[in-house]
Amino acid sequence: MNPIRIWLSDARKRPDSRHVDTCDGLRAIAILIVAWYHIWQQSWLYPAVDVFGRHISFDPLVRSGYMWVDMMILISGFCHYLPWARLADGDKRPHPVDFYAKRLFRIHPSYLLTIAVMFAVALATDAYYSDAHLRLDLFSHLTYTHTFFYNSYYASNLGGALWTLAIELQFYLIFPWLAREFKRSPLMTFLAMTCFSVAFRLWGLSRYADVSMIVNQLPAYLDTFAFGMAGAHIHHTLSRHKRGAASRIACSALCVMMIPLVWRVVRAQASLSSVEAIRIGQMNHRMAMNVLGCALLVLSANAGLIVRRLLSNPLTRFVSAVSMQFYIWHQTIAVWLLKYRVIPSEAEHPNYEGDLRWQVLYTIACFAVSFLVSAVLTYGFERPVSRLLQREWNAWRTRPKKTAHAEEAEE
């Protein structure tokens, strides 16, 4: 079939508000940059290429890679609010209990498996400096409260990436109520969530010289979730109307225009040096990341075929599918590969001494092993267990209820 006819026919389709395929690509990009940052912390491989005699450095992107956690959280708010946005199409309102069950079935088994493995390794290597530290680390992780305590957040032996799952679970507790209010009054709820979050960050910056326990708390991310929910609301509104080729082209062009704006924020954040300045910069740049991330989500979902295929293809769908396991395990795998010197080098400290061959091989190994482990856990554990639990839950929820007369007859 003629490619031009394919593009034109695709341009006339309404954007899908059930599965926004471009989310796969944006999620994949975000998680790969975050992983690149964590692996770079171990390898110290400064990424740069020479193209036609011009030296191009990706160091600002990698050095500020932690900022893309914000994009992952924004996508979470977008995806979770889409079912509520579709209520206008006659979809059934999600029941809070079913929402809680579905999220727990998806996350909790893998979360418990991770804690079990990490805790066993910590005990085997005598990693805890006291029994109190052990008890706090284990209890706070099992209750998703480890972001509340310094020693279970910054000094945890159960994986540095699990803090985001705590933020997600804490948000899930209030999400059904927020979604209901957002559905009733999108603008007022969005402004309330955003203003509360900005006020919390300003309060933390004005009150504490050290914002380490402020920067990544749920209140500091509430506006990020709000922008994700707003993006879902806007996208669903647009999806109710057919989009012409001109609209697709305009959205594609605006997507491209977002790239240099994102790069400006990235460079500004990467220019910060001290740990405290980085944390303050992260909070100060969060609003810019929210705006640009929301714009990218909506524009890419309504863009032309080329942009959508770049963001939704077999590779990005695979990365998105294994993203939770990849995010949970990549940092720990990178630390273990370095600690046990899986990649040999004649240098005692090949990362600090700049052994380029080792740095390249180590970086490749970190990504390869992380994806292998993630694929095995996703398709061999996460999905089968989640589907089994969901099936049992659905059967229990739809079981026929006995009448009082039937109960008396049994007695």
Image (spheres, grey):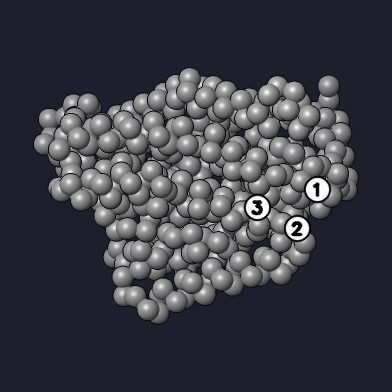
Which callout, 2 or 3, points at the residue further toward the start of the chain?
Answer: 3
The answer to which of 206 and 411 lies nearer the viewer is 411
Foreground mark, 2 or 3?
Answer: 3
Label 2 crowd bin: few (<14), some (14–19), many (20+), radius 10 Å = some
Q: Quadrant of residue 229?
A: bottom right
- Residue 212, located in which quarter of the rendered image? bottom left
The residue at which mark 2 appears reads as 183
- Mark identifier at residue 87: 1
Helix, strand or loop for disc 2: helix
Image-based side of 304 in relation to 102, left or right? right
**Label 3 neighbour load within 10 Å: few <14, some 14-19, many 20+:** many
How many angstroms separate mark 2 from mark 1 (CA)? Answer: 9 Å
Residue at x 71% of width, y 69% of height: 188
* Callout 3 amino acid: Pro
Q: Is residue 301 visible?
A: no
Image marks 2 and 3: residues in contact by CB distance under 8 Å? no
Q: Earlier in the sequence, mark 2 or mark 1?
A: 1
The answer for how far apart the CA atoms under marks 1 and 3 are is 14 Å
Contact between marks 2 and 1 (CB within 8 A): the answer is yes
